[in-house]
Image (tube, grey):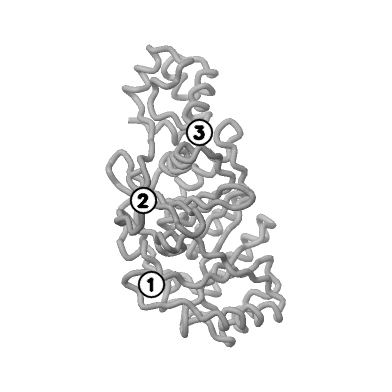
Amino acid sequence: MIDIKSLTLPELEEELSIMGQPSYRAGQIFKWLHSGVKSFDEMTNISKELRKKLDIKCYISSATIEKKLISDYDDTVKYLFSFRDGETVESVLMKYHHGYTSCISTQAGCKMGCTFCATGMGGFVRDLTASEMLAQLQAEQEDGNIRISNIVLMGMGEPLDNFDNVIRFLRLVSDDKGMNIGMRHISLSTCGIVPRIYELADLKLQITLSVSLHAPNDLIRSRTMPVNKRWGTDELLEACRYYIKMTNRRISFEYAMIDNVNDTDACARELAKKLRGMLAHVNLIPVNTVSGSEYTKSKAERLRAFSEVLEKNGIAVTVRRTLGSDINASCGQLRRGEKPIKRVVG
């Protein structure tokens, strides 16, 4: 069957043409799909005959809320979604003064095996389709009766390991006839799949690229991030420079602060030296507690000292605000099918 919500408008027009339908029908159906309908029967301006044909030939991907947890501290919401094959992923909805940001998953599980991340500990199952990424957003909007204005591809999975589906999702979600969330309101996080960074750069999309660096050199980074054994730190940073050149977009380097691992002044000085002259900033993230990992977050005074070293060396730096830690919704804490640890809503 055809995954109809993953089709672009021109592709949908082609499918409808094969069925002997005028092109304007594709526009009507596209609008319905991106409003979040779950069945063809909801498309009230489409004939019953055509709806029946579509139902036989196609399916509409949706995300079913299996569990919903709300933080007691900041109203962050974590969802456990299931898809038509029963596979599950987690997604996080965050409220800021400027609106709602959704952190969605791009894969069920992850292959990358970063040692401070819960997702990779559960292994990899499959890629998500573009429609399943859209479905996470639509389910959150419907559940909260809200409009999401910003997206971060920082949930479960490595987006660039699911490159084609992610690019399709970016084009669909930014379509002005669909959800119309502009590329500049979307961030994509990668652990550093270098060939895909070059491919992404050549597309010249206006998204924000976030690179999970987490160490200033190969010795430390290879201990915590297996991907570094394939593409080392210097090779990754060279790809990042190419990305900046092609897109003129600033890169955000994510840096998980781990006590006695990567948080020394020497690490900060080495990091500053490697990033000097780049259109970039460093986002420091006190590493979150993950079951199965012995890592602990850096002490507050170490975080301040590390920041000061970067600033004195001309590197822009921020410290990420931690949201949803009481419901295991923070960076690196998402797992497949996790059981609720807080109150269940709905």
> Disc 3 or disc 1, which is closer to the eye?
1
Going by the numbered disc 2, the residue's amino acid type is Val
Which is nearer the N-term, disc 3 or disc 1?
3
Q: Nearer the viewer, residue 342 or 96?
A: 342
Q: Which residue is mark 2?
A: 89
Residue 173 spot, x, y in % from top left:
54, 40
Residue drawn at point x = 47 percent, y = 70 percent: 231
Q: Which residue is mark 1?
A: 115
Quarter that holds the C terminus: top left
Going by the numbered disc 1, the residue's amino acid type is Thr
- Image vertical order of residue 262 relative to residue 167, above or below: below
Q: Which residue is mark 3?
A: 8
Task: Kindly report the distance in space between the C-alpha atoms of the residues bearing marks 1 and 2.
Answer: 20 Å
Q: Nearer the viewer, residue 333 or 50?
A: 333
Which is nearer the N-term, disc 3 or disc 2?
3
Task: Kindly report the distance in space between the C-alpha atoms of the residues bearing marks 3 and 2.
Answer: 24 Å
Residue drawn at point x = 52 percent, y = 64 percent: 322
Residue drawn at point x = 51 percent, y = 15 percent: 22
Q: Secondary structure at mark 2?
A: strand
Quarter-of-image position of residue 334: bottom left
Going by the numbered disc 3, the residue's amino acid type is Thr
- Image vertical order of residue 272 relative to residue 82, above or below: below
Residue 296 spot, x, y in % from top left:
43, 78
